[in-house]
Image: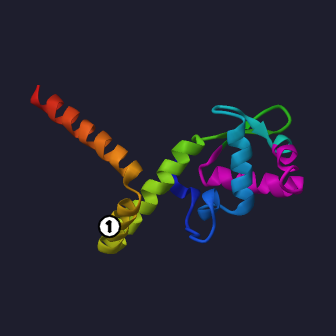
Amino acid sequence: MDIKAFSSFHAGKSGLRKVLGDLEADIMEAVWARGPGARVTVREVVSDLHSVRDPAYTTVMTVMGILTKKGLLEAHKTRLAYAYEATATRQQFTEQVVATVVQELLADFKEPALAHFVQAIAQDPGPAQDWAGRIAGRRAAERAERGR
């Protein structure tokens, strides 16, 4: 997946809406809910979205085209319409977004970014301790592999 998927970060919003518009996020959630590799038509997405909003078919079609240009969806021509498939799972997309945001923060604001990461870890060390163990294990495996 190409990271053209987002160009701005909205700190005041939650979840996917930090990097996608509201309708974009709802559409991607509908596509991901069908499972990896599933293909979905615009009509199916419109139907899925009726529980949270009442979007026009043409609006959903336009936004799915935009998500295709951004690299989040891939369009497949069928007999009568296009079927769309996510180019990455929700987890893969989230990991790529986080990696990009962290890289950008460190590139432009290394010292304050690191200071805030350390402060956040100090306030809630649980998950960080788990990751520290994983990183240490990975480094030990890499050293052992190089030693062979």
Element at label 1: helix
The front one of 51 and 6 is: 51
Task: Tell which residue pokes out farthest to the left in this image.
Answer: 147
Q: Tell whether 30 sits left or right of 99.
A: right
Q: Tell whether 132 sits left or right of 50.
A: left
Q: Position of residue 70 (x, y in %)?
A: 61, 55
Main SS class of the magenta portion in the image:
helix
Give the magenta range.
Answer: 45-73
Residue at 60% from the left image edge and 64% from the top image edge:
18
Q: Is residue 69 magenta?
A: yes
Residue at 86% from the left image edge and 35% from the top image edge:
80
Label count reads: 1
Measured along the vertical axis of the image, is residue 57 above or below residue 112?
above
Q: Is residue 15 magenta?
A: no
Q: Position of residue 39 (x, y in %)?
A: 72, 34
- Label 1 sits on residue: 114
Q: Which image quarter: residue 83?
A: top right
